[in-house]
């Protein structure tokens, strides 16, 4: 369990609709006078943003192991300089992606999910989200959405559909392994309806955590 605040993460393949839902959730919470710290991975800190630049630049060429360590390095800084201080201050910290993204995206080839978990142990320093919202969407639908934005694809988004099918599958496996913490939502829902469904889950979970503390 985190400090006095709550730590909520959003996960999903690229284009699933995470940022849209993080925006709505932060707005709703602020309207309800909840103090919110919004952040993201990779990034969320000055050094993390520089690492993000390296990771997403299509011109960067690196080994998968190097990539896994760079995500973990960004996370190490993020946990210590943003998330833990925010939680200690009683804020509700919302991160657009966290360690489950590494378990899903970096667990390829010699890097098993177990090895990615081990590699992230020191970065995480025992921190686990109180609640993870997984927005699930078929790869083809997510691709269509990203194409419609007209933005150039970053280094990760240039990977093929088979890679994203594996990432999606691993995210769903993570959810199945943590049924009390990770909740799956249908990314094909209308954004407003999806927000209402996630909002209900956040209220329930925060209520349960309050009783447990
Ligand atoms: N529920 C939805 N239905 C239809 N379109 C959506 C929905 N949610 C988001 N979109 C649109 O899909 C695109 C991608 O959404 P968004 O940026 O929220 O996804 P994301 O998961 O954060 O993507 P990335 O991982 O690449 O940052 C945007 O153009 C957004 O307006
Ligand atoms: C935290 C994290 C992220 N990724 C990937 C997932 C996305 O392709 C990019 C981040 O871009 P976004 O626009 O912020 O979604 O990075 C990853 O592979 N591993 C991770 O741990």
Image (cartoon, rainbow, N blue to C red):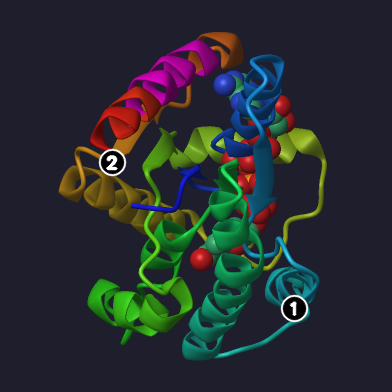
User: Judging from the image, what secondary structure is the residue with disc 1 in?
Assistant: helix
Q: Position of residue 44 (x, y in %)?
A: 71, 60
User: Judging from the image, what secondary structure is the residue with disc 2 in?
Assistant: loop
Establish if 206 lies above or below 174. above
Mark 1 to mark 2: distance in Å? 31 Å
* Residue 22 in which image quadrant: top right
* Residue for badge 2: 181
Q: Which residue shows up at 72% across the image and 70% down it?
A: 52
Dot 2 crowding, Cα within 10 Å, few <14, some 14–19, many 20+: some
- Magenta stretch secondary structure, dominant: helix
**Residue 150 appearing in the image:** yes
Q: Is residue 145 magenta?
A: no
Q: Position of residue 105 (x, y in %)?
A: 44, 65
Q: Is 48 placed left or right of 67 in the picture?
A: right
Establish if 181 lies above or below 186. below
Asked if the residue at label 1 sits under 8 Å from ligand 2, the reply is no
Q: Is residue 204 magenta?
A: yes
Q: Which span of residues is magenta-colored?
A: 195-205
Name the mark nearer the viewer: 1 or 2: 2
Q: Which residue shows up at 37% across the image and 65% down it?
A: 103
Q: Position of residue 156 (x, y in %)?
A: 61, 64
Q: Is 48 placed left or right of 115 in the picture?
A: right
Q: Is 19 placed left or right of 111 in the picture?
A: right
Return the residue nearer the eye: 16 or 1. Answer: 1
* Residue for badge 1: 54
Q: Earlier in the sequence, mark 1 or mark 2?
A: 1
């Amino acid at each position: 369990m985190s400090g006095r605040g709550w730590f909520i993460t959003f996960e999903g393949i690229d284009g699933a609709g995470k940022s849209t839902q993080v925006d709505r959730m932060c707005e709703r919470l602020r309207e309800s006078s909840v103090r919110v710290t919004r952040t993201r991975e990779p990034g969320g800190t000055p050094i993390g943003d520089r690492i993000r630049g390296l990771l997403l630049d299509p011109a960067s060429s690196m080994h998968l192991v190097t990539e896994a360590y760079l995500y973990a390095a960004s996370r190490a800084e993020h946990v210590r300089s943003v998330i833990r201080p925010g939680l200690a201050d009683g804020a509700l910290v919302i991160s657009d992606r966290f360690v489950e993204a590494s378990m899903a995206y970096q667990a390829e080839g010699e890097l098993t999910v177990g090895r990615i978990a081990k590699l992230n142990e020191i970065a995480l320093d025992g921190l686990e989200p109180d609640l993870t919202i997984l927005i699930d969407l078929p790869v083809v639908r997510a691709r269509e959405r990203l194409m419609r934005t007209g933005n150039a694809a970053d280094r990760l988004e240039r990977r093929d559909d088979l890679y994203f099918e594996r990432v999606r599958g691993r995210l769903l496996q993570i959810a199945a392994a943590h049924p009390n913490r990770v909740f799956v939502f249908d990314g094909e829902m209308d954004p407003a309806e999806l927000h209402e469904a996630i909002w209900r889950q956040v209220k329930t979970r925060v209520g349960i955590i309050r009783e447990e503390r």
